Image (cartoon, coloured by chain):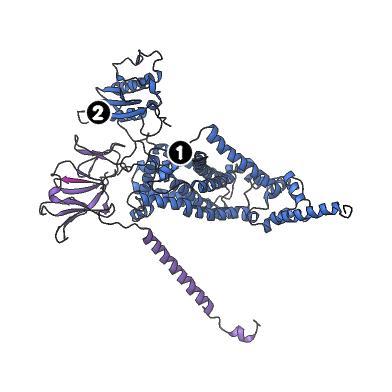
Amino acid sequence: MSNSPEQATQKRVPVNRREFLNLAWLASLGFFTLNIAGVTYLFSMPRFKEGEFGGVVNAGSVSELPAPGSAPLNLPVAKTWLSNTEAGVVALYKVCTHLGCLYNWNNQQQKFICPCHGSQFEADGSYIKGPAPRSLDRFVVRAIDPNTGEVLAEAVDSPLPLENIPANAIIQIDTGKKVTGVTHT
Amino acid sequence: MLKSLNFNDLRQKAVRAIDNRVRIITAGLGLDELRAVMRGDPPTEKPNPRYRVHTTSFLFHIRPRYYEKGSTIFTHTFRLGFFTSFFFFVELITGLILMIYYTPSPEAAYQSILELESNVFFGKLLRDMHRLGAEAMVIFTALHMLRTYLTGSYKKERSFTWFTGVILLGITLGLSFSGYLLPWDQLAYWAVTIGTSMAEAAPLLGQQLNLLLRGAPDIGAGGLLRFYLAHVVLLPLGAILVISIHYYKVSREHGISLPARFEEGNVPPEVKKNAKSRVDFIPDLLTHEVFLTTLGLLALLVAIISFGYSAPLEHHANPQQTPLDTKAPWYFWWLQGMLKLGDKTLMGIILPTIIVLLLIAVPYLDRNPHRSLFKRPIAVSLGLLSVMTLVVLSYMGLPVYGIETPAATRIIQDIAPEEGQGPLYEIPFDQLQPGVYTVSETPPDELCPTIDFGCPKLTEVFLEFNNRVIEAATNPNLSEEQRLPNPEAVMVIEDWQQDLRKVTLRIAWDDPRTNQRTSYEKLVFMHRDHIRE
């Protein structure tokens, strides 16, 4: 049969119907798999409520902050040391950049010292000495108008200056946005 | 009536009926044949029914019909692959049983381990077996890989088998690491914190990856559940799939490689023929496997019962406090060592990725057709060099390397560590004589002259404290961090309550860096009835 002259002369179509349909099913399956991967990714990604670590945490109003240059404030909920330096407010992530230990404020020496391996940092988080590869990580800090909720000022990788901010403004720490400290050489 | 019954006939019928049932269960082996298998006799029927089992039985169809005699030589494989899968099955079975009592939540996990260790028949034994089996599986996987590398068995047609092996190495480490967190003690919590923070160093995706792994910015209830599910479902499923592919390649496609001495060079034909002769799976290899399984189980039990292996369990996880000398699990020490050498992204992510890619690419990079150790000097020396590098890096990953703990902290923590056993805890309660013992004032050999049985253990510990403080104070060769100029060190023992004593270790010194008087102290409460493990 396959040798019949009609079949031999019949042109072989580049893609026949079955091949096309099979390719279409496979493409749909591939697309579907990608969808499932995306859904799984979004499903597994944790979301954070306000006031929860990983989300936005309120640190009180500007008037409640410690005086500039005094000991930083320990905020366990935000896993943060809130430091009010001369240059402005910094929210430092509590975890040492060396191996993940929790460092502490040493009031006598006026610096952060990690109990594990002795890394030391200034009140604004910058590296002094020790095995840590970089300065302390920071969270994004915002000043919010208490009445309108409007963002008055935002500081990403610099301290938040308080000069032009009213005393009743709320300081917010966005613990979902971490800024990696500067690597020293 | 009796005469009408033909007993002989009846007996034959019964035997035949039983024989038939047995044949159905054993996929073709009759009673006589089973006996012959047990005895190692030649097959009783023709064609050989032992081969038929491999096509009719599910469990046997994945096993080979035979191996070539040369490949079964002990010093060629050391049965490392067998023991790797043996330990996988040990983990599977003990793990399933342990799941009965385990609850994956931060509130209940530690409690369920305590319950398991103290109030469940054989609970501690099963946990010890599971932990020891996990360590052994990692060790045997690595040794199996090293053996395959040294005998050149990854070459040519076996390159894909090598690739699946590299994936299995990753899955094995993942299984072991995810199980590490589950007891929710300080050891687990901080080792995994360090391990997952390495993932954070990955460029672009690091933070996302870390969130996916931990379910939160730090390890908590979500992270524990994710690790648990990975440990009991995702990774075992992956392991079973890849092990099946890996094993199928070995058993049904290429067989175990012959030692190079039978394949390369001028091998006399009769030697080659002998090496290629078949050793049937049933009965010889099966018998051997039964023996090895028994041996493996015996070794596990002896290690636990006679040598006293005990799975570690420290205090309940405390996210607010990092213990001194925190380290990753031992099979990641090399990574921790690398992290000390440079940038977290380069050393923690980029270099390890390159190492894994190189490992996968080994069969394609190595174009040398020879398999004999002596004909591949470069490959063998590179392999041995890598092993030595790993050992050195692992040493560098330990807290003793490159991390200077201040002298006072070091001395006091060595005598009374936060976790585990230490010299101070070994002092019997009655020897803890209340008093103030001052370094270089109290004569260290006369601590309690008033009690007639003396206090040898207390004296020993105080002597160590005394000597180390004096050493740190007087040795001029030590670094600034390690020196204790002008020290005042005391060990105070007080009666605190009935049967409870408080031990204070305190060192004060002039800190040369700040020129200030600094002190470090630690309090330990010891109870008469408390037994520290």
Residues in magenta? A79-84
Chain appearing in purple on the rendered image: A
Instruction: Give the left or right position of residue A128, taking residue B163 as reference.
Output: left
Q: Are marks 1 and 2 in contact (CB under 8 Å)?
A: no
Say which of B14 and B167 sits in front.
Answer: B14
Chain appearing in blue on the rendered image: B
Residue that mark 2 sits on: B519
Please say whether residue B450 is visible from this viewpoint: yes
Q: Residues within 10 Å of mark 2 (few under 14, many from 20)?
A: some
Residue farthest bottom in this picture:
A6
Q: Secondary structure at mark 2?
A: strand
Instruction: Give the left or right position of residue B100, taking residue B339 as reference.
Output: right
Residue farthest front in this picture:
B1
What is the x, y in percent for residue A125?
22, 44
The CA span between labels 1 and 2 is 37 Å
Using the image, name the chain to which the residue with label 1 belongs: B
* Magenta-drawn stretch, dominant element (helix, strand or loop): strand
B446 over A165 or under it: above or below: above
Residue that mark 1 sits on: B391
Say which of B354 and B423 sits in front.
Answer: B423
- Pick the quarter of the image with the N terminus of chain A: bottom right
